[in-house]
Amino acid sequence: SQQGEEDPQALSIQEGENATMNCSYKTSINNLQWYRQNSGRGLVHLILIRSNEREKHSGRLRVTLDTSKKSSSLLITASRAADTASYFCATDGPRNTNAGKSTFGDGTTLTVKP
Amino acid sequence: DTAVSQTPKYLVTQMGNDKSIKCEQNLGHDTMYWYKQDSKKFLKIMFSYNNKELIINETVPNRFSPKSPDKAHLNLHINSLELGDSAVYFCASSTRTVGGMGTQYFGPGTRLLVL
């Protein structure tokens, strides 16, 4: 298994619904980040959560981190068609090192139908 | 203003050729990366440079040679291209922070197709 696995692999919802994506990882981390990738584009940073944080909000995004379960979730509330994209989690670590390397998960492809 | 730019955007070439991809960032970051994204969207780090010094080399074939003339540029040269090299290559940059990776800023990608 890869460090940083997302599930589900694909998610299709109606506009206005909430979308939840999960990420699991294997080693201890310094922080975890979520990125979005629109089709044919580069990745765009959404939110960073540190290993000593449990929850973080940014607009319609809510990220949780459970280091005991080595998992994180990304919730997008009141989804819009423009949220259609692939979402990746990225972890760095092991914790308390500055390895300077992010490991990306396989991504969740979100489709929001108008 | 483009933060991280890559050229070319598309690259179609024959097997066995040598090609280069260029990357430039105007964010003042000291760390730059090359990633390879395959057809299944799996994103894997290839190299990382910090202040022109190689710090990560992820068991990439030695046909791939990164070069960083200054901390704002990180180019990727690929010798003897193979079919399996077909992918999207992303350049990224970030600051190095105490306590983990900072935010990475990605370029638009270079779509390489080897025929």
Image (cartoon, coloured by chain):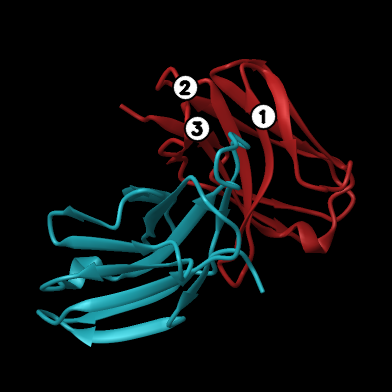
Spot the red chain and give its letter: B
The first of marks 1 and 2 along the sequence is: 2
Q: CA distance from mark 3 to mark 1?
A: 13 Å
Specify the quadrant that holds the N terminus of chain B: top left
Marks 3 and 2 belong to one chain: yes
Asked whether A52 or A24 is in front, the reply is A52
Q: CA distance from mark 3 to mark 2?
A: 6 Å
Q: Which residue is mark 2?
A: B29
Could you tell me which residue is drawn at 14 percent across and 61 percent down?
Answer: A60
Q: Secondary structure at mark 1?
A: strand
Q: Position of residue A16 (x, y in %)?
A: 9, 79
Location of residue B28 in the rendering, given as x and y in whole percent from the top left corner: 43, 17
Q: State the image coordinates of residue A101 (x, y, percent, origin top left).
A: 60, 42
Element carrying mark 2: loop
The subunit carrying tag 2 is B
Q: Mark on residue A63?
A: none
What residue is drawn where x is 85% and y is 45%? B17
Hue used for the chain lettered A: cyan
Residue closer to the observer: A99 or B33: A99
Local crowd size for mark 1, using a 10 Å CA cut-off: few (<14), some (14–19), many (≥20): many
Left or right: residue B107 compared with residue B88: left
Mark 3 or mark 2: whose residue is earlier in sequence = 2
- Up-down relation of residue A7 to residue B78 (above or below): below
**Which part of the image, by quadrant, shows the C terminus of chain B?**
bottom right
Badge 1 sits on which subunit?
B
Marks 1/2: CA–CA distance: 15 Å
- Left or right relative to A68: residue B47: right
To which residue does mark 1 refer? Answer: B75
Asked if the residue at tag 2 contacts the one at tag 3, i.e. Cβ–Cβ closer than 8 Å, the answer is yes
Q: Name the residue beneath numbered marker 3.
A: B93
Label 2 neighbourhood size at 10 Å, few (<14), some (14-19), many (20+)?
A: some
| A59 or B28, nearer to the observer | A59
